[in-house]
Image (spheres, coloured by chain):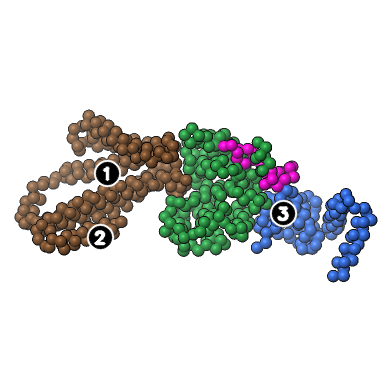
C-alpha cells in the first residue's frame, strides 16, 4: 500500500486541492463525472476527512466542482472553467520556477537552459 | 482447584491405608482427617475468595466496564461467593459427610449412632436459628472483611510506594483487630444471646454501613493499578 | 447540542503531595482526531486515566457529552494494557470478555481489525510479541462503537509498515460522532491524519491547537512547531 505523503509545513488541504485540480486537468476525473466521496479520498490519501472537505470546498468555491444535492461532487461541465484552471496552474508553476532561478540566472540563460532540456527529452 | 481438593480428600486416605492397614485406628484417623481437611479447605478457600474479590477493584479490566460502582461491588461479591460456595462448600460437604459415614458404619455400633442422633432434638426454631445465624455470619464475614480490605487499599494510597505493602499488611491486621473488638463490645452491650433479633438487627446495620462505606471508598478513592 | 464533545474544567490530580496534573481546561468537539504530546512523565497516561475515571480524587470536572459522573465510562474506550488477564488466556476468550462486558462491542469490527492486522485470535495472549499485543489492544479498543477512544502510546512497539497501515486505517474507524485522543512519540507519521494537538508541559496544558492553523499561520510542520513551543516556554 502506497501512502501519499504531503509536505508537513504547508496546510494539507491546499496540497490536496492542488492534487485534485491536477487530476481534473489531466482528465483523471473527466468533465461532468463524479469525484470520489470524502471518505474514499480520505482513505486513498491517508488524510483526515475534514482536510478533504476543506480541499473540496476550495474547488467548489472556484466552481471547478459542482455539488449535486444527495449525489456528491461533480467536475463542472463548463470546459472554460477547466481551461482557466489549467492556465492558472501554468502561471503559478512558471512563477515558482522562475522565482527559484531568478536570483542567479539571467532571463536568456533560463530560456536557453529550458530549450536545451526540452530538446534532450524529445530525443529520448 | 475443586478437582485438586477432591483428589486430596479421596487419595489422602489411600496413603493412610497403605501405612496402617485396615483396622480401627485407620478408620479413626480417616474420620478425623476428613474433618480436618474440610476445615483446611474452607480456610484456603476463604483466603482465595478474598484475594480474588480484592483483585477486581485493582484491575483495569473490571474498573473500565460500563457499570456503576455499586453494580460492580454487588456483582463481584455475589458471583465470587456463589463460586466459592459451589466449589468449597461442595468439597467440605463431601468431606464432612464422609467422616460422618465412617463414624456411623465403622466406629459406632448402629445403636450408639441412633442414640447419639436422638439425643439431639431438632425443633423448627432451632433449624431457623441455625440458618439465620449461618447466613448472618457468612454475610457479615464477607462484607466486613471486604470492607477492611478496601479500607486498607485506601490507606495505602497515603504512603510512599515502597512502604505500601508493609503498611497494607500492618494496617489490615490492626483494622481487623480493632473492628472485631469494637463490633464484639457493642454487640455484647446490646444483647447477650448469640442468636437474638437484636443481635441480628445489629449485624444487619453493621453490614449495611460497611456496604455503603465500601462503595463510597471504591467510587472516590480506590484506583486500579497501572 | 453545545455539550457534545469532551470538556475538561480545571482538571488537576495529585498523588499524596506531588502534583501530577494541574488546572487543565479544554473543550474538544466530536469528530476530531487529537494527538496528546509531552515528554515522558508529564502526565499523559494520568490524564487519560482521569478522563476514563480510573484515577480517583482528581480536582475539577470531566464532562463527556454532558455526562460528568462515573456513567461516562460507557462512552469511553480506553486502551487497557490487558495486564490483568492471565497470559494463558486465548485472544478469543479476551474478546468474549469484552463482548459480554461492553454492550457496544462490535464482534464483526474486531474480526475485521484482527484480520487486517494479521493476528490469529486462536493464539494465547502471553505468546504475542510486543508489537502484536499492541495491535490486539488497538483492535479491542477501536471495536467498541462509542464516543471517545483513548489510545495510550499505541504504536511504540509496532514496526513501520504496520504502523503506516494502522494510521491510515484510523481515519476509517473514526466518524463524526466520535473523538480519538492518542498519545504518541511518533508524531511525524500521524501529522497528516490528525486535526488537533494538545501539548502538555510541566503538569499542565501548554496549548490545544488545530494543525492546519499551525501550518498556515506558522509555516511549520506540527513536529517543528511542537519542538519550538516546547523549548520556548
- Label 1 resides on the chain identified as B
Q: In the rendering, which numbered label is found on residue B64?
A: none
Horizontal and vertical percent position of residue B161: 44, 39
Q: Is residue A17 visible?
A: yes
Left or right of residue B23, residue B83 in this image: right
Q: Name the tint of chain A in the rendering.
A: blue
Q: Tell me the SS state at disc 2.
A: helix
Which residue is disc 3 drawn over?
A: A6
Q: Which residue is mark 1?
A: B138
**Foreground mark, 2 or 1?**
2
Q: Residue at x 54, y 38 (%)?
A: C62
Height in image: B7 above or below B201?
below
Please state if A32 lies on the left or on the right of C73 as rendered: right
Tell me the magenta residue range.
Answer: C199-225
The lab-note entry on whether marks 2 and 1 share a chain reads yes
Count neighbours of disc 1 (C-alpha within 10 A) and say few if under 14, some if 14 to 19, many if 20 or more.
few
Give the mark, 2 or 1, whose residue is nearer the N terminus. Answer: 2
Image coordinates of residue C13 in percent, x first then y, are 51, 36
- The crowd level at tag 2 (other Cα within 10 Å; few <14, some 14-19, many 20+) is few
Q: How far is the residue under mark 2 from the one under mark 3?
A: 68 Å
Write the residue at 90% across / 59% down.
Answer: A113
Same subunit under labels 1 and 3?
no
Residue under numbered circle 2: B7
Drawn colour of chain C? green
Q: Using the image, name the chain to which the residue with label 3 belongs.
A: A
Asked if residue B188 lies in the magenta stretch, the reply is: no
Amino acid at each position: 500500500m502506497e501512502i501519499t505523503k504531503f509536505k508537513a509545513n504547508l496546510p494539507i488541504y491546499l496540497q490536496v486541492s492542488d492534487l485534485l485540480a491536477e487530476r481534473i486537468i489531466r482528465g483523471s476525473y473527466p468533465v461532468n463525472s463524479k469525484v470520489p466521496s470524502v471518505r474514499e479520498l480520505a482513505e486513498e490519501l491517508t488524510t483526515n476527512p475534514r482536510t478533504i472537505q476543506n480541499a473540496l470546498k476550495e474547488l467548489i468555491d472556484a466552481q471547478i466542482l459542482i455539488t449535486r444535492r444527495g449525489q456528491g461532487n461533480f467536475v463542472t461541465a463548463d470546459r472554460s472553467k477547466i481551461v482557466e484552471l489549467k492556465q492558472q496552474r501554468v502561471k503559478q508553476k512558471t512563477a515558482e520556477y522562475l522565482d527559484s532561478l531568478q536570483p542567479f540566472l539571467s532571463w536568456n540563460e533560463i530560456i536557453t537552459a529550458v530549450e536545451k532540456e526540452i530538446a534532450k527529452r524529445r530525443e529520448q | 482447584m475443586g478437582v485438586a481438593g477432591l483428589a486430596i480428600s479421596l487419595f489422602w486416605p489411600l496413603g493412610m491405608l497403605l501405612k496402617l492397614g485396615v483396622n480401627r485406628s485407620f478408620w479413626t484417623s480417616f474420620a478425623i482427617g476428613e474433618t480436618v481437611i474440610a476445615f483446611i479447605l474452607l480456610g484456603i478457600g476463604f483466603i482465595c475468595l478474598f484475594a480474588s474479590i480484592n483483585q477486581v477493584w485493582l484491575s483495569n479490566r473490571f474498573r473500565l466496564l460500563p457499570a456503576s460502582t455499586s453494580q460492580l461491588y454487588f456483582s463481584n461479591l455475589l458471583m465470587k461467593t456463589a463460586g466459592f460456595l459451589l466449589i468449597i462448600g461442595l468439597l467440605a460437604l463431601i468431606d464432612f459427610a464422609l467422616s460422618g459415614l465412617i463414624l456411623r458404619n465403622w466406629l459406632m455400633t448402629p445403636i450408639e449412632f441412633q442414640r447419639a442422633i436422638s439425643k439431639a432434638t431438632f425443633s423448627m426454631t432451632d433449624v431457623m436459628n441455625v440458618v439465620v445465624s449461618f447466613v448472618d455470619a457468612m454475610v457479615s464475614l464477607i462484607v466486613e472483611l471486604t470492607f477492611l480490605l478496601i479500607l486498607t487499599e485506601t490507606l495505602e494510597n497515603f504512603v510512599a510506594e515502597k512502604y505500601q505493602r508493609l503498611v497494607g499488611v500492618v494496617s489490615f491486621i490492626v483494622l481487623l483487630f480493632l473492628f472485631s473488638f469494637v463490633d464484639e463490645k457493642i454487640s455484647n452491650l446490646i444483647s447477650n444471646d448469640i442468636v437474638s433479633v437484636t443481635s441480628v438487627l445489629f449485624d444487619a446495620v453493621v453490614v449495611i454501613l460497611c456496604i455503603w462505606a465500601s462503595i463510597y471508598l471504591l467510587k472516590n478513592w480506590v484506583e486500579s493499578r497501572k | 447540542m453545545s455539550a457534545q464533545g469532551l470538556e475538561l474544567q480545571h482538571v488537576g490530580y495529585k498523588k499524596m503531595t506531588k502534583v501530577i496534573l494541574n488546572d487543565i481546561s479544554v473543550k474538544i468537539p466530536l469528530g476530531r482526531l487529537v494527538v496528546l504530546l509531552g515528554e515522558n512523565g508529564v502526565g499523559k497516561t494520568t490524564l487519560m486515566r482521569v478522563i476514563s475515571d480510573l484515577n480517583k480524587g482528581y480536582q475539577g470536572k470531566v464532562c463527556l457529552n454532558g455526562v460528568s459522573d462515573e456513567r461516562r465510562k460507557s462512552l469511553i474506550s480506553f486502551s487497557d494494557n490487558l495486564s490483568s488477564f492471565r497470559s494463558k488466556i486465548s485472544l478469543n476468550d479476551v474478546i468474549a470478555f469484552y463482548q459480554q462486558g461492553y454492550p457496544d462491542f462490535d464482534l464483526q469490527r474486531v474480526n475485521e481489525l484482527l484480520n487486517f492486522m494479521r493476528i490469529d485470535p486462536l493464539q494465547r495472549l502471553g505468546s504475542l510479541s510486543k508489537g502484536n499485543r499492541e495491535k490486539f489492544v488497538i483492535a479491542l479498543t477501536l471495536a467498541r462503537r462509542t464516543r471517545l477512544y483513548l489510545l495510550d502510546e499505541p504504536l511504540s512497539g509496532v514496526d513501520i509498515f504496520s504502523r503506516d497501515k494502522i494510521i491510515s486505517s484510523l481515519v476509517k474507524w473514526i466518524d463524526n460522532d466520535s473523538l480519538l485522543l492518542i498519545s504518541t512519540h511518533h508524531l511525524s507519521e500521524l501529522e497528516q491524519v490528525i486535526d488537533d494537538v494538545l501539548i502538555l508541559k510541566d503538569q499542565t496544558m501548554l496549548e490545544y491547537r488545530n494543525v492546519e492553523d499551525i501550518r498556515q499561520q506558522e509555516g511549520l510542520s506540527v513536529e517543528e512547531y511542537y519542538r519550538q513551543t516546547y523549548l520556548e516556554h
